[in-house]
Amino acid sequence: MSTPPPQYPNQPYGQQQPPYGQPQQPYGQQPQPYGQQPQQPYGYPQQPQQPQPPQQPRGPQRPPGAALRMVKAAVVVIAIVGGLGYYVWDYNTSPTGGKAKAEASASAAAEEAKTHDPEVGDCVKVADPKGKPVPTVVDCGSPEAEYKMGEMLPGQGQECSAKYDYGIQYYSSRGFDYTLCFTKV
């Protein structure tokens, strides 16, 4: 023999009360039939019942040791940049390179030009006097001194007068031609 389910007092329409721990309908509402979503009580704003969006798939996982490789690559790049920076700094501050070398070279060239560009009263020795003569300024008291410069004649084709023992003519493509006249020391 079967017994009917127990009836609980204060239940509308003789319905069963859900077991403890289960969600209950608010007071005075009917349970929803199967397949329908529960309704909010009157007076409360309704919220849309939407399923949760699927989670985005993660990118491929890095293989173990990838961080170590990135650190090694960063160290190599920093070492190369540091080496280049040191080279540029050293080149520009060293007396044998960079600006210092260019300035020293220009200074040496200016000094060299002075030794081959005598002025009136300078004593010179002449290398290759019969071919392409190059006068070099020397001290008048030295045994190397051969001639003393007496005059510079501007213009092409100028000849030294008879009072001079030796003359060197210079021709320039820039149009500044001259003749240097020397007397023996």
Image (cartoon, rainbow, N blue to C red):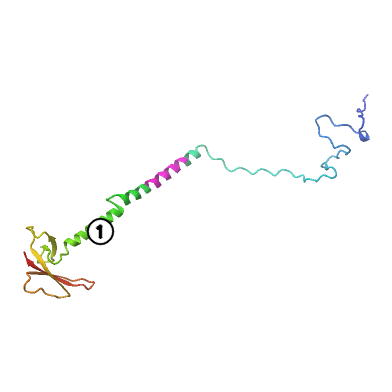
Indicate the secondary structure of the residue bearing disc 1: helix
Q: Does 77 appear in magenta?
A: yes
Question: From which residue to which does the magenta span run?
Answer: 71-83
Residue 41 pos. (x, y %): 84, 42
Q: What residue is at 31 percent from the left and 50 percent from the top? A: 93
Name the residue beneath numbered marker 1.
Answer: 106
Q: What residue is at 35 percent from the left and 49 percent from the top? A: 89
The amino acid type found where label 1 is placed reads Ala
- Image quadrant occupied by the N terminus: top right
Horizontal side of 121 relative to 15 (left or right) equals left
Horizontal side of 80 relative to 52 (left or right) equals left
Reply above or below: 13 against 133.
Answer: above
Q: Nearer the viewer, residue 123 or 101?
A: 123
- How dense is the environment of label 1, judged by Cα within 10 Å: few (below 14), some, or many (20 and up)? few
Residue 122 pos. (x, y %): 12, 64
Q: Residue 57: name its quadrant.
A: top right
Q: Residue 138: name its quadrant.
A: bottom left
Magenta stretch, overall SS: helix
Q: What residue is at 28 percent from the left and 53 percent from the top? A: 100
Residue 52 pos. (x, y %): 71, 43
